[in-house]
Each structure stands twice: as structure tokens, then as C-alpha cells.
Amino acid sequence: VDKNSQRLTIAIQKSGRLSKESIALLQACGFKFSLHEARLLAHSSNQPVDLLRVRDDDIPGLVMDGVVDLGLVGENVLEEVRLERQATQLACKVQRLRALDFGQCRLSIAVPKEEAYGGIQDLDGKRIATTYPYLLQNYLQQRGVSANNAILTGSVEVAPRAGLADAICDLVSTGATLEANGLVEKEVIFRSQAQLIQRPEPLSAAKQAIVDQLLPRIDGVQMARE
Ligand code: ATP
Ligand code: ZN
């Protein structure tokens, strides 16, 4: 990505739960894209705008580092990356432009259904499997609980049965996955939806003009869907 390009670059999730709606929103705002499955970059044919399609985990960092101008990402991932970068002294500022009306989920702690659970303090000294160690640690610390994390990038929900952890901290939407794995949701630690974020440094006048045009369109599209 050419940082000096006059084309506004927007990072979106390449393939996953935010992809369809991210593209649909931008299209509803008037940007035309022809998407080729294999390509990282998609040019808009009617605006000086490029889409960069990446893993959602990479989006906050790309925006914080100013490698891209805008990003559409879940607040859960945004906050996890922000905490991680804060702890490791990397740039962690972004501008939050809009909360978007998709990607709703929650990050919750769940325990095996046969375990008695009297409150968060019961997790003191226990091991919790998660993909969100910073959000989890933040929540536990504020409540004076010290637990050990087992950091997994996937299959978190099978960790208790596999003997890897006593509890899990994972994204929940319907609860069906928890149920299927004999787990019960006990604490909601973070509620999330997709966010439109912008890099911290000011945009060029040309790019800012596109953003100024985009924001009211997003508001219009979301208002019409309410
Ligand atoms: P990637 O390969 O990009 O890393 P991923 O497997 O980490 O993908 P997805 O499962 O596609 O991520 O979820 C992307 C984001 O969608 C989550 O971080 C969250 O913000 C949101 N999300 C999670 N579960 C749901 C859900 N059931 N419905 C809508 N949005 C969700
Ligand atoms: Zn991811």
C-alpha cells in the first residue's frame, strides 16, 4: 500500500462474519467494487477508493500505524489489539467514526455445566482458555481475580473437555456452540459490534472529502435499516 496515494484505502475482513456486510455497506454508500476472490486489493471503479481485504485481527494495527486510512472491524478485536499495543508500547490510537449496525456479539466467560459457579472470584487460580488474553486480563484485574490464561487461536470451546482449561472466554452470539460443548455462560465481559475507524493522523484534503461524503451516507443507510 502506497501511503502517499491519493486513493482512500479501507481495510475490511477478507472472509468471515464481517465481510459480506462490510462490502454491502460500502456498496450501499455508492462505491462500486469488483471483487476478485484471490486479490488482496480491490479498486473502486467510480471513486478513488481501494479496499484492502485482510484478516480482521490485522485491521486495527493497519489503521493505528496509518498503513490504511479506514477500517471496518469488530470492537472486540479493536479493543484487544489496543490493549496489546498499549502494553507493548506500539501506536494504539485510532479515531472512531461510527458504530455500525452489524457484527453484534459478546465476549463471555463460560464454565462446564457440572461446575458450581458462585461468581468471578471462583476463577481465582484457575486456567481460562481464550483468544482475547488482554480483554480477559483487564476484566479479571479490575475484579481482583488472578487466573492463568491458555491462549488459543481456535477451538477455545473444547479446551475444558480436553483438560486444557477450567473455563473459557470466547465470543458468543446464540450460545449454541457453548451448549454443544457442555458449557454455560456466566459473565459477559465485553459487548461488541462492528466499528468504522480512521487512522490517527489527519487525512489529505482529497481523502477527507471522501470521508465527509461517506459518513452521512452511512448514517442514512443505517437509519433506513433501523
Ligand atoms: P479472520 O480469518 O478474519 O481472523 P475470524 O475467524 O477471526 O476471522 P470471524 O469468526 O469471521 O473471525 O468473526 C469476525 C468478527 O465478527 C468477530 O471478531 C466479531 O466482531 C464478529 N462476530 C463474531 N461472532 C459473530 C456473530 N455470531 N454474528 C455477527 N458477528 C459476529
Ligand atoms: Zn480473526
Image (cartoon, rainbow, N blue to C red):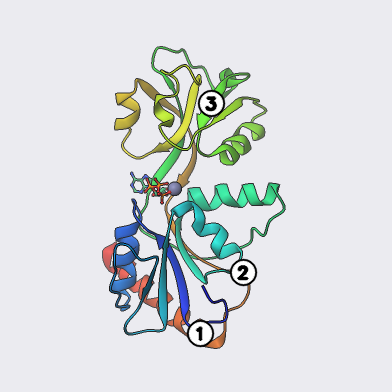
Relative to 150, residue 89 above or below: below
Mark 1, secondary structure of its residue: loop
Q: Name the residue under label 1.
A: 6
Mark 3, secondary structure of its residue: strand
Q: Dot 1, crowdedness within 10 Å: few (<14), some or many (≥20)?
A: some
Looking at the picture, tell me which residue is in the foreground, 216 or 49: 49
The answer to whether residue 94 is visible is: no
The kind of residue on which mark 2 rests is Pro
Of the numbered discs 1 and 2, the one sitting upstream in the chain is 1
The image's mark for residue 128 is 3
Write the residue at 62% across / 38% down.
138
Write the residue at 37% across / 52% down.
103
The image's mark for residue 106 is none
Residue furthest toward the bottom?
A: 206
Looking at the picture, tell me which residue is in the foreground, 211 or 68: 68
x and y percentages locating residue 149 in the rendered image = 58, 29
x and y percentages locating residue 8 in the rendered image = 47, 78
Q: Name the residue under label 2.
A: 200
